[in-house]
Amino acid sequence: MAATRHAAGADETDALRAFADEGCSPARAWGNGPGDRYGRHEHPVHKVLFCLEGSLVFHTDDGDIELAAGDRLDLDPGTSHAATVGPDGCRCVEAWRR
């Protein structure tokens, strides 16, 4: 599957440790307000994202993937996706697997 959700129960410390253990790029933190949207796009690298607060839904060709605080999402390179932020906004941290 091109996109995989893991109910990791992770906090920011866990996410940063996972990035380091997996040899990922430096982490980038971001957040958005309720209902914000990202248009369909893809990345040339493997994306690893942890939802730290709130929620968001990733829209992929294989269906929607709902993330809540503590969840991890892995997106294979070239996976087309869009996203919609949940009703309470979100705060996430992501990195690229090398």
Image (cartoon, grey):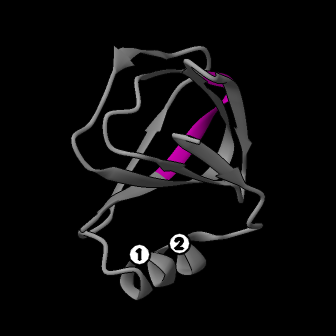
Residue 71, image x and y in percent?
Answer: 69, 55
Q: From which residue to which does the magenta span run? A: 85-92
Residue hosting label 1 = 19
Residues at badges 1 and 2 in contact (C-beta under 8 Å)? yes
Q: Residue at x 51, y 40 (%)?
A: 2
Q: Residue at x 55, y 22 (%)?
A: 60
Q: Secondary structure at mark 1?
A: helix
Considering the whole magenta stretch, tell me its main secondary structure: strand
Q: Is residue 28 left or right of residue 50?
A: left
For label 2, count other residues whose C-alpha is less than 10 Å away and answer few (under 14), some (14-19) or many (20+): many
The three-letter amino acid code for the residue at tag 1 is: Phe
> Residue 40: which quarter of the image?
top left
The C terminus: image quadrant? bottom left
Q: Secondary structure at mark 2?
A: helix
Residue 37, image x and y in percent?
Answer: 48, 14
Residue hosting label 2 = 15
Residue 53, image x and y in percent?
Answer: 66, 49
Residue 86, image x and y in percent?
Answer: 68, 25
